[in-house]
Amino acid sequence: MSMTNPQGSESGRSNPGALSQFTGTVALVGAGRMGGAMLDGWIGLGVDPARIAVIEPQPAASIAALAGRGLRLNPDAASLRADAVVIAVKPQVAPDIMPNVAALVSPSTVVVSIMAGRTIGFLADALPRDAAIVRAMPNTPAAIGRGITVAVPNARVTPPQRRLADALLAATGAVEWVGDEALMDAVTAVSGSGPAYVFLLAESLARAGAKAGLPADLAARLARATVAGSGELLHRSPQDAATLRHNVTSPGGTTAAALDVLMAADGLDPLMERAVAAATRRGRALAG
Ligand SMILES: NC(=O)c1ccc[n+]([C@@H]2O[C@H](COP(=O)([O-])OP(=O)(O)OC[C@H]3O[C@@H](n4cnc5c(N)ncnc54)[C@H](OP(=O)(O)O)[C@@H]3O)[C@@H](O)[C@H]2O)c1
């Protein structure tokens, strides 16, 4: 199903389409922004709403509407046999909801948590003994099906459970698997928090354009379209970022003049390194 690369991570062969054949039951606990995006993805991939249970105190109208197509909204835990339970509540709510999650878990259930900073150890302590657990970190482009999620399984996750978790997560974009949970703080610092860095790049480029004499609103439109278009180009191109950068940089030209500043010893690299290190440290501290 997936390939291992030299760094020990695994990627690339998710099969979200397999979900359309899904005949089990998935319970989603928390259907806010991220849980809602996953649910949209599952429905979009053809999962029968009758295969889904949602536990959510304030369901959006679209979720309530799915109840008319068979989705079970806030069912009694005793009436549910879930093959997968996806936890998508805020991390601070976790201690309150874990007893309810535990009630949904049978020996064959895989629990998939996307809660930032909540470790496999925390989850295992709150779940029945020997529970199969996947800890995952998605990011906000999940809302448009273009996210990337990094997942780490515990030793109890069987190959079919991992395939199910992979397909559920792949409904919102790409999925990477790692074997070492300690990497999750750095993952959070790169892809989890990363969209904010890219949005900041658009803001910063707009401010610099205004300083260079452009009307502020024009500078903002140029920066926005440049970041969005370059991201799309990177997404569609088989070439890596460095090659695409080389392709638009003539020796001695305007782009090269700017890159000389950005790629100087005190340029973007050391700044980004410090930013990612700060986020990694913060993730570690929050996880306790
Ligand atoms: N958003 C991101 O970019 C992102 C990225 C990576 C990871 N995550 C993780 O994803 C998780 C969800 O984030 P989010 O942005 O989707 O948050 P969110 O929009 O606040 O969604 C959380 C949902 O859980 C519901 N909830 C609260 N208490 C509940 C309970 N007892 N039982 C069932 N549902 C309950 C909330 O309902 P109420 O509104 O009524 O409280 C809300 O709808 C977080 O743990 C976060 O760390 C998010």
Image: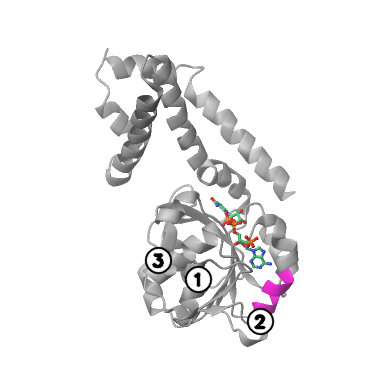
x 44%, y 83%: residue:
23
Q: Which mark is in front, 2 or 3? A: 2
Give residue 63's mark.
1
- Tell me the CA gap for discs 2 and 3: 32 Å
x 57%, y 35%: residue:
276
Q: Is residue 31 above or below residue 102?
A: above
Task: Please name the residue that numbered disc 2 is placed on.
Answer: 77
Q: Is residue 102 above or below residue 175?
A: below
Give 247 or 153, whichever is nearer the viewer.
247
Give residue 1's mark.
3
Label whose residue precedes the other's in the sequence (2 or 3): 3
Mark 3 secondary-structure assignment: loop
- Tell me the CA gap for discs 1 and 2: 19 Å
How many residues crowd around disc 3 within 10 Å: few (fewer than 14), some, or many (20 or more)?
few
Q: Is residue 214 left or right of residue 143?
A: left
Q: Give the residue type that dot 3 points to.
A: Met
The spot of residue 176 in percent (x, y) is 46, 55
Quadrant the N terminus occupies: bottom left
Where ligand 1 lies, by quadrant? bottom right
The spot of residue 29 in percent (x, y) is 60, 69
Mark 1 secondary-structure assignment: helix
- Residue 4 is a magenta residue: no
> What secondary structure do most residues of the magenta stretch adopt?
helix
Residue interval drawn in magenta: 98-104
How many residues crowd around disc 1 within 10 Å: few (fewer than 14), some, or many (20 or more)?
many
The spot of residue 123 in percent (x, y) is 69, 64
Q: Give the residue type that dot 2 points to.
A: Ala
